[in-house]
Image (spheres, rainbow, N blue to C red):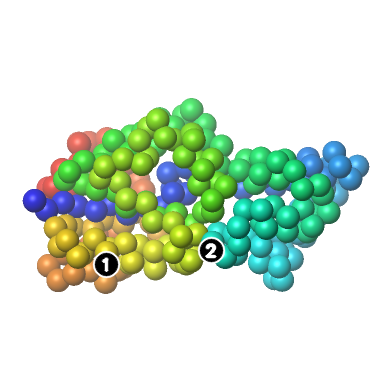
Amino acid sequence: MTYNITILSLGQLTQPDVSKTTAAFANILQEEKGYSSWWSNVVVTYVHLMDKLWHHTLDNYNLGNIETNEFRHNLAWQFGIKETDKIDDAWNAMCKISPENLNRISRILDSANEHNKLLVISSTNPLQDIYIKTQTNYLGLYRENIDIIKSFEEHDLSLKNLAQKAINNLAEDGEFSHIISIHRDIKTLDVPEGVKFTHKTQQEFFNDLDSTILTGEL
């Protein structure tokens, strides 16, 4: 029996809000260093810029090149703050899922069945992966007909590369007939001969969910 594969990112599912993590680190700086709110936000912006240009702590963690303890230690040093669980909480703050978004995630996950599998591409890291899992586990994020490929396990931050690798692995079974990507960075893939590839917007995807239960005909 053939099936469809719908590709989306973990970020599209969870809709992270980076401003929450920015605010959380700014709060730590105010508490520990006595900085003003304005200066704390300046420092957070500066630390993030220097990490992108020089330290690469965030990218290395998302790539799986460093362990969580080293990630926490590096951030504590870069911010000049204590190495405590507050760092974990601040880092995870962007991934807090609202009740409304949990309902939205449930709709997406429930579209997965034997005719339509979901391929979730994740460019996150171990701390946030666990945090998201604790919030979504009861919805069945890790269930049959849903595959998840993670950047920190594959050592690759490119969503397109991760999707291509997953498709290549699934192609060994040769059972799927249609790939549907709803991510803006995955508009093309090398697909096996005879397999149809379609790119849809998120709105088009939700219109499909609203209009019908996804079947092998879509």
Residue 102 percent location from the top left of the image? 44, 32
Residue at image mark 1: 168
Outermost residue on the right side: it is: 34
Q: Quadrant of residue 174?
A: bottom left
Mark 1 packing: few (<14 Cα in 10 Å), some, or many (20+)? Answer: some
Q: Could you tell me which residue is drawn at 54 percent across and 51 percent down?
A: 126
Q: Using the rendered image of the protein, determine whether residue 201 is visible from the camera's viewpoint.
A: no
- For the image, the number of numbered tags is 2
Q: Is residue 111 above or below residue 51?
A: above
Q: Is residue 90 left or right of residue 172?
A: right
The alpha-carbon separation of the residues under discs 2 and 1 comes to 20 Å
Residue at image mark 2: 63
Residue 31 percent location from the top left of the image? 85, 38
Looking at the image, which is closer to me, 111 or 151? 151
Three-letter residue code for mark 1? Asn
Q: Could you tell me which residue is drawn at 81 percent across and 47 percent down?
A: 82
